Amino acid sequence: MTSDDCLFCRIVSGELPTELVAQSERTIAFRDINPAAPVHVLVVPRRHEPTIGALAAASTEDLADVFALIAQVTQQEGIAEHHRLVFNTGSKGGQSIFHAHGHVLGGKVFTER
Ligand code: AMP
Ligand code: ZN
């Protein structure tokens, strides 16, 4: 399922431009437009599911591919040994775009929880 009014579906389809970092058959990775760290990449399954939990329930293959592409991105960006992964879930969890995605953050020292 895709959604015409889903921003990340429009990026996945190529309708909206983005700074692509990596991609696979099931997943794409692009730079966050408002970076919270020197490296801030969003890893997004091509399949539209609202949350990472919904993606896990829908397709273990898509879920596994998200993590495989995260590993590739951290290697490419030189942060494989030092980075932070964030999956905001639900509006109260800080999620603003309801198409599952992981934030890969790096290039700085994280101290706060
Ligand atoms: P979240 O709050 O976890 O749903 O994360 C959504 C993220 O998408 C935020 O960090 C935004 O800065 C980012 N974002 C919003 N629009 C775009 C865009 N067009 N291209 C890249 N990142 C975006
Ligand atoms: Zn979507």
Image (tube, rainbow, N blue to C red):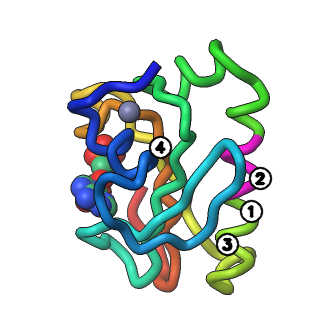
Kindly identify which numbered label has been placed on residue 74: 3
Q: Are marks 3 and 1 in contact (CB under 8 Å)?
A: yes
- What secondary structure characterizes most of the magenta part? helix
Q: Are marks 2 and 1 in contact (CB under 8 Å)?
A: yes
Whole-angstrom CA distance, mark 3 to mark 1, is 5 Å
| Apparent side of residue 6 relative to residue 80 in the rendered image (left or right) | left
Instruction: Report whether residue 94 is seen.
Output: no
Which residue shows up at 46% across the image and 65% down it?
30
Kindly identify which numbered label has been placed on residue 71: 1
Whole-angstrom CA distance, mark 4 to mark 1, is 14 Å
Q: Which residue is mark 4?
A: 101
| Local SS, label 4 | loop
Whole-angstrom CA distance, mark 2 to mark 1, is 5 Å
Tag 1: Cα neighbours inside 10 Å, few (<14), some, or many (≥20)?
some
Q: Amino acid under label 2?
A: Ala
Q: Are marks 4 and 1 in contact (CB under 8 Å)?
A: no
Q: Amino acid under label 4?
A: His
27 or 64: nearer the viewer: 27
Ligand 1 is found in the corner quadrant, namely bottom left
Which residue shows up at 48% across the image and 68% down it?
105
Q: Is residue 68 magenta?
A: yes
Looking at the image, tell me whether mark 4 or mark 1 is earlier in sequence order.
1
50 to 99, vertically: above or below? above
